[in-house]
Amino acid sequence: MTIDAGWYNADLDTAADLSVASSVWPNQQQAAGEDRSRVRADLIPLPSGSGATTLQDLIDELSEVLGRSVMMQDSGFRLVAASAQGEDIDELQVRTLLTRTLAHREREWAEKSGVARTRHPLTVDFAEFGAHERFVIPIWADDEQLGTIWLITSGLPPLGEDDFRAIDATVAVAGTLLQARKRGAARTARETVFHALLSGDPSTRREALAVAVRSHGIRRGPETVVRAVTVGEDAPVILRAALGHALESSARQALTFIGERGTALLFIGRLSPQEGIDEVIRSEAERAGVLLKGVGAAALSEHDTDLLPVAARAVATAKVVDLVPELGSCALPDDVGPWLLLADVLADPERLQWYSPAAHALLHDPDPTRRQTVEVLLDAANHIREVCDTLHIHRTTLYYRLENMPEVVRNALGNGMQRSALHLALKLTRYWESAGHIR
């Protein structure tokens, strides 16, 4: 769900003659021209296509991951959000959906069972009321229980490790959402400004950056960087959201979440020792159960008025890091400049023979040592001793290999422009192989 797509009314306001479906899943579309100052307090910007995630989004996502119905209630046992209902539904679930609250007798039983006090998940048996057993997960923040998540467990497969990881992620994000809902304001002024840095409107982005510099501690210059943290494409929104929150909490000065582009979570912050930030990102991604593919960072210049191009450089750098493992897990654009150049080349392997016939010949040569030898030679700028040390061969062996190269390769090595094209084309070939364009 994106900001432009609409806002979800998570209060489930009472209306006459509503069906179960219309009560639980009201129209999410924002009316054209609706005043955005009326945005609900249960909305918060999270990694979901640079838009807003709601409690309903989280419950729907968790239900899909767990393969069962999910409900969320606030601390007063009032219904906050509910997923689509499956075959596990019972009369207690139906009454809760219709009345939007837990009935008095069942509520007393839940309170007696410790639901309102527990800080840990617990199982509550509702057999006395002709209903299924429930697994109840509390949501706490600042020593206050804000709500609970309810799952029916009777007759369903036991929850696994991945299920519990998804539940933990949902609880972490839901806590923030419920706090914002209780405060009556979804975003602080600072959050609003930072999430406008990647707006689709250029003037909005420029104004947001100006305000961030003027009022929120952002400085134009290399001491401020945008980091792109790319994760696996199949990472659920709740796990990406949990990772974003965890990174903000662990490295607040260096990582403030500002949005998402594709599979990259984007953060802005101060330049910090790279090794320390990398370790924080790696450990938090592992804890969140999210596949970390690469991290790219790009610094602001003193003249930048728009953050989007800086973010684009960070994302492009992270993509290169993912495809070229020897670069390490994180890099700056200055570290991978030639690779960024190659990444912009049209991904059409057939054009390789246009760029360098010599590279094309080496790509299809049945003897892979020829390609390796030429690439190492060019990387070492023709320093013979360095080439021999890298390849672990004698100088005579190197000369023999070069003498027996295909004619098109020997000609390229003897011509300055062709030699440069050959070097870049060999790197381009490796990049295409890593990206799956050449197999």
Image (tube, helix red, strand yellow):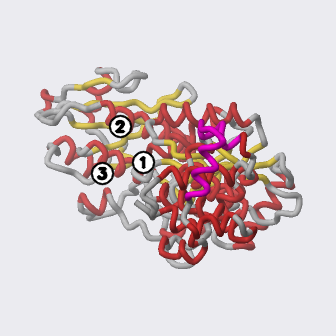
Please tell me which of labels 3 and 2 falls first in the chain.
3
Tell which of 206 and 366 is nearer to you. Answer: 366
Residue that badge 3 annotates: 83
Above-or-below relation of 73 to 81: above
Q: Are marks 3 and 2 in contact (CB under 8 Å)?
A: no
Residue lying at 72% horizontally and 45% vertically, measured from the top left: 384
The magenta stretch spans residue 38 = no
- The answer to which quarter of the image holds residue 305 is bottom right
Residues at marks 2 and 1 touching, judged by CB atoms closer than 8 Å: no
The 10 Å Cα crowd at callout 3, few under 14, some 14 to 19, many 20 or more, is: many
Magenta region:
386-404
**Regarding mark 3 in the picture, which secondary structure is present there?**
loop
Kind of residue indicated by mark 1: Ala
> Percent position (x, y) of residue 390?
63, 39
Q: Find disc 1 in the rendering and name its residue.
A: 235
Residue 113 occupies quadrant:
top left
Which SS class for mark 2? strand
Residue 106 placement, left or right of 188: left
- Could you say which disc has been placed on residue 184 in the image? none
Residue on which disc 2 sits: 149
Give the alpha-carbon distance from disc 2 to disc 1, as whole Å. Answer: 22 Å
Q: Nearer the viewer, mark 3 or mark 1?
A: 1
- Left or right of 114? Residue 35 is right
Comparing 132 with 159, the one in front is 159
Most common secondary structure along the magenta stretch: helix
Element carrying mark 1: loop
Q: Look at the image and tell me whether residue 50 can be seen.
A: no
Q: Quadrant of residue 153?
A: top left
Label whose residue precedes the other's in the sequence (3 or 1): 3
Nearer to us of marks 2 and 1 is 1
